[in-house]
């Protein structure tokens, strides 16, 4: 069994009167300390890696092993029975999360308070659902400068990359339900903000943003859906 905290003595083969022999030499105390410190640091780093990526790994495992969400989205349409809330439901990836409206995408102190609670944010200055053709709403679950814990928050939203053209998602807002169909997906730079003002005169659009590649904040994945 390997002992990570015990230094193995160095050995070298020598010839003594024509016969081979082995001489062992123990490292000095400083070398032993460096060996111990290196192994402790490795174990701490591994533990921190597990701490950061376990929620993400669990989300990926659940999805690819056939995860089925408990809550199924109801028939889309106006209904007085729906509470006055703001939620995003992406049944394909098992996402059902609360949305906080009018969150500044440029003030990290504000949006980090939202995102660290496993909520997602509606970008301030963009339209709200039901605003009509020529408008777009922008929802984001990760952003730049979110901190090292970015990987632990809203891990299910990293699965947005599994959405493809014609996949659907639902937004509940102000007592109504809105059904969107995906029509485009693209990867952009981390500082790309032009999509905050995206407009198509023939569509009402909802844009969903997450970090990309999965588990990093290098770039942004945008999923664009058209209101049906």
Image (cartoon, helix red, strand yellow):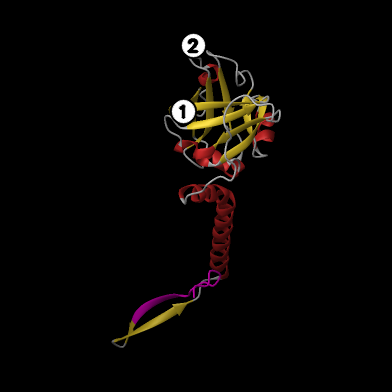
Image point (53%, 72%), residue name: 3
| 134 or 172: nearer the viewer | 172
The residue to which callout 2 is attached is: 201
How packed mark 1 is, by other alpha carbons closer than 10 Å (few <14, some 14-19, many 20 or more), is many
Secondary structure found at label 1: strand
The residue to which callout 1 is attached is: 182
| 155 or 200: nearer the viewer | 200
Q: CA distance from mark 1 to mark 2?
A: 17 Å
| 45 or 154: nearer the viewer | 154
Q: Does 13 appear above or below 64? A: below
- Pinpoint residue 214: horizontal percent, then vertical percent: 49, 41
* Image quadrant in which you'd find residue 105: top right
- Magenta residues span 1-14
Q: Does 28 appear above or below 61? A: below
Secondary structure found at label 2: loop
- Pinpoint residue 121: horizontal percent, then vertical percent: 63, 30
* Relative side of 118 to 8, left or right: right
User: Magenta stretch: residue 204 in it?
Assistant: no
* Image quadrant in which you'd find residue 78: top right
- Pinpoint residue 62: horizontal percent, then vertical percent: 51, 50
Residue found at the far top of this picture: 201
Q: Earlier in the sequence, mark 1 or mark 2?
A: 1
Residue 216 visible somewhere in the drawing: no
Secondary structure that dominates the magenta span? loop
Residue 154 visible somewhere in the drawing: yes
Whether pointer 1 and pointer 2 mark residues with C-beta atoms closer than 8 Å, the reply is: no
How packed mark 2 is, by other alpha carbons closer than 10 Å (few <14, some 14-19, many 20 or more), is few
- Pinpoint residue 86: horizontal percent, then vertical percent: 66, 29
Numbered tag placed on residue 150 in the rendering: none
């Amino acid at each position: 069994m390997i002992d990570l905290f015990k230094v193995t003595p160095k050995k070298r083969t020598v010839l003594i009167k024509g016969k081979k022999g082995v001489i062992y030499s123990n490292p000095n105390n400083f070398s032993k300390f460096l060996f111990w410190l290196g192994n402790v640091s490795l174990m701490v780093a591994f533990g921190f890696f597990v701490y950061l990526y376990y929620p993400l790994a669990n989300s990926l495992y659940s999805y690819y092993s056939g995860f089925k969400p408990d809550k199924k989205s109801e028939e889309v349409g106006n209904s007085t029975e729906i509470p006055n809330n703001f939620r995003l439901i992406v049944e394909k990836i098992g996402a059902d999360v609360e949305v906080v409206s009018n969150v500044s995408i440029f003030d990290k102190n504000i949006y980090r308070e939202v995102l660290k609670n496993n909520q997602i944010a509606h970008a301030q200055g963009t339209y709200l659902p039901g605003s009509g053709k020529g408008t777009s709403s922008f929802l984001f679950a990760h952003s730049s400068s979110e901190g090292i814990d970015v990987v632990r928050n809203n891990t299910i939203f990293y699965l947005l990359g599994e959405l493809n053209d014609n996949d659907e998602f639902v937004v509940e807002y102000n007592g109504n339900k809105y059904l969107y169909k995906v029509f485009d997906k693209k990867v952009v730079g981390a500082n790309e903000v032009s999509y905050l003002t995206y407009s198509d005169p023939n569509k009402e659009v909802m844009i969903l943003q997450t970090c990309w590649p999965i588990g990093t904040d290098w770039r942004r994945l945008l999923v664009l859906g058209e209101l049906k």
